[in-house]
Amino acid sequence: GAGVSQTPSNKVTEKGKYVELRCDPISGHTALYWYRQSLGQGPEFLIYFQGTGAADDSGLPNDRFFAVRPEGSVSTLKIQRTERGDSAVYLCASSEGGNNEQFFGPGTRLTVL
Amino acid sequence: KQEVTQIPAALSVPEGENLVLNCSFTDSAIYNLQWFRQDPGKGLTSLLLIQSSQREQTSGRLNASLDKSSGRSTLYIAASQPGDSATYLCAVRTGGFKTIFGAGTRLFVKA
């Protein structure tokens, strides 16, 4: 497929568990973004990658959240010791460069019980 | 701190009407502004991107304008159709690579 893909589409976990969310950007896109969206709100910025490096991680809420992009393509968002407040839809987007049009994936709905 | 506001929060119009959605932002130092639509339970679909040096962009029945000095953007939808029913979001790209979204306008077009 030519678009951004995210797996899994749904993830249910228990409080305190560790989760990983995956994003496959559009081929050739050097910029990758993670957001999270709560019901009735716009997406909230978490982190921006340019290539392999996190150029801006100022949106990560605390040190339980971490993201990597080791080869400059696929990215994984990692959440440790999940809390019920982490429940949201996690969205990934990619673009050709940092100032270009962003294309979004379908999201991963995370539910923490 | 950049804040993005969208008014109205919800809008219901009859099919065929032309309509305007509003987006305002507090800091004019932006790199670009992008409009998206989001269907229930889905991801975001890009509609239009306006770079900071541009005044407007057009795609089909959609026209988006940008006035950086006043911190405003409008999305104009001509001859609305039921298929246009969705939530419309605007987002500004700020310095430091952050993208800040508004809460969106929920549009319902009645057949």
Image (cartoon, rainbow, N blue to C red):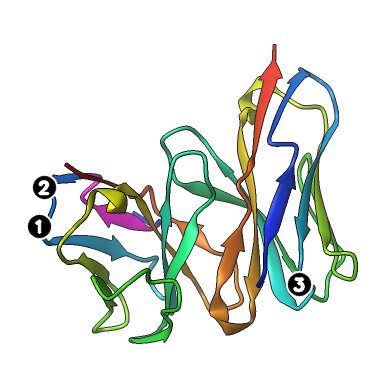
Q: Classify residue B110 by image quadrant.
A: top right
Q: Classify residue A20 by image quadrant.
A: bottom left
Percent of width and height locating residue A9: 25, 45
| Disc 1 to disc 3: CB gap under 8 Å | no
B85 up-or-down from A22: above or below:
above
| Kind of residue at disc 1 | Lys
| Kind of residue at disc 2 | Glu
- Identify the residue at image location x=71%, y=23%: B81
Pick the residue in front: A82 or A24. Answer: A82
Left or right of A39? Residue A13 is left
* Chain to which the residue tagged by mark 2 belongs: A
- Identify the residue at image location x=32%, y=82%: A72
User: Which residue is disc 1 drawn over?
Assistant: A17
* Any part of residue A49 in sight: yes
Query: Where, quadrant-wise, is the N terminus of chain B in this rendering?
Result: bottom right
Give the secondary structure at mark 2: loop
Give the secondary structure at mark 1: loop
User: Which residue is disc 2 drawn over?
Assistant: A14
A59 up-or-down from B25: above or below:
below
Mark 1 to mark 3: distance in Å? 39 Å
Query: Where, quadrant-wise, is the C terminus of chain B in this rendering?
Result: top right
| Disc 1 to disc 2: CB gap under 8 Å | yes
Taking the magenta stretch, the answer to whether it contains residue A14 is no
Percent of width and height locating residue B57: 80, 58
* Chain to which the residue tagged by mark 1 belongs: A
| Kind of residue at disc 3 | Asp
Magenta-drawn segment: A4-10
User: Which residue is disc 3 drawn over?
Assistant: B27
Mark 1 to mark 2: distance in Å? 6 Å
* Chain to which the residue tagged by mark 3 belongs: B
